[in-house]
Amino acid sequence: MTTTHIDVLVPFWGLAGGVIKILDYADHAAQLGRRVQLWAPPMPTNDALVMKLPVVQRLVDSDNVAVHPLDELTIDRSEAVLFTDPTHHELIERSTTNSLGPRLIHLIQGTRHANPRWQDGRNYRLLHRPMTRITVSNEVTSAIRPLVNERHPLHTIVEGHDIDYFSKRPTAAPPDRGVARVLYTTWKSDLGDRIQQRLAETDDAPQVAWISVREPLGWPSLRNRYHGADIFLCAPGPEEGFYLPGLEAMAAGVAVITAVVGGNATYVRPEHNAMVADYDDVDSHIDALRTLSVNAELRSSLVEHGRATAQLHRLERERDEFAAVLATVGT
């Protein structure tokens, strides 16, 4: 049976990568001609940063999408239900008297789902329930596969992103780059601050200019930060499902320094498209930074290969693979 009506549950409206990805999938379904019922908390005001996202603008403007209050979820007539937040599973079960089986689709975005200590084991236990699963990277698939009954469909759709958006250069003139400009965020880790502090205490610190991002930014501002930098110090969490900022920096033409944690191994190729350092290790990241800050040729090589890597993660490819999964859903 071809799915023509799909319900998609959104945990909250925000700039977090997991939320953006479930919105991408809702957009995929709408562009594939499905009628999308988007169940979400109250919409934020129009001036909220999330409302400026291209995917949100497409969803709001689409004739194929209707937005309903999450706390009024009703799915008895649904032909497929897509969710990412594990806490929504109980909400779904309370909202229908029917057995959804493979028509229930869980988008799993982190290797931590295989960790029985995370979230008191709720996500771990959910892996044993019958449903269709989509993971965003081969690493997430490898983490959960031993815990999923082989009779339950498990698909890997390697994460896509709006590569063209981050590749597009701002119209303003590029900054004067007498020294390498190093960008880092503090959303998940203080690693960048610790690196900067350590270097400030040494006599032979590399000549760099620091750009720190301490609060979530809208995409236009974030893109401008990438394009104003030469090097991006990634600060991923320990159990990432993918880690979009590293790929965004590659798309924007920035040399990347990163640890390999979970799903970012999908796109990180050591010394080819990124310099790899040990996780949360200040000295290891400083060694990589010293090398890149003085080696413009190596930075250019990483940038070239990073741009090529980013092109492998376009939303169009993700949409096509999701279409193939939807074609198998139903009875």
Image: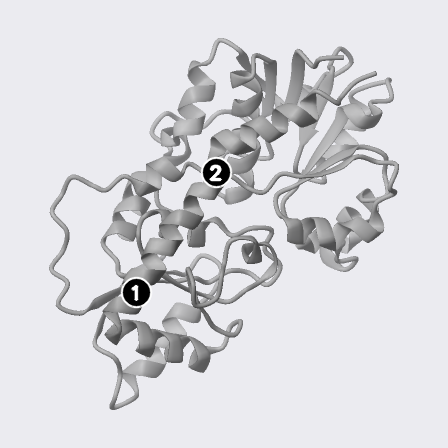
Q: Which residue is mark 2?
A: 14
What x and y, as percent, mark residue 46?
Answer: 36, 25
Q: Quadrant of residue 11?
A: top right
The amino acid sitting under disc 2 is Gly
Considering depth in this image, is 165 or 225 the residue closer to the camera? 165
- Give whichever of discs 2 and 1 has the lower sequence position: 2
Q: Which residue is mark 1?
A: 299
- Disc 2 vs disc 1: which is toward the camera? 1
Q: Quadrant of residue 37?
A: top right
**Could you tell me if residue 324 is visible in this image?**
yes
Q: Quadrant of residue 101?
A: top right
Considering the numbered disc 2 on the image, is that residue within a helix, a strand or a loop?
loop
Q: Is residue 2 above or below residue 94?
A: above
Q: Is residue 297 above or below residue 82?
A: below
- Distance between mark 2 and mark 1 Cα atoms: 33 Å
Quadrant containing the C terminus is top right
Find the residue positioned furthest to the bottom: 203
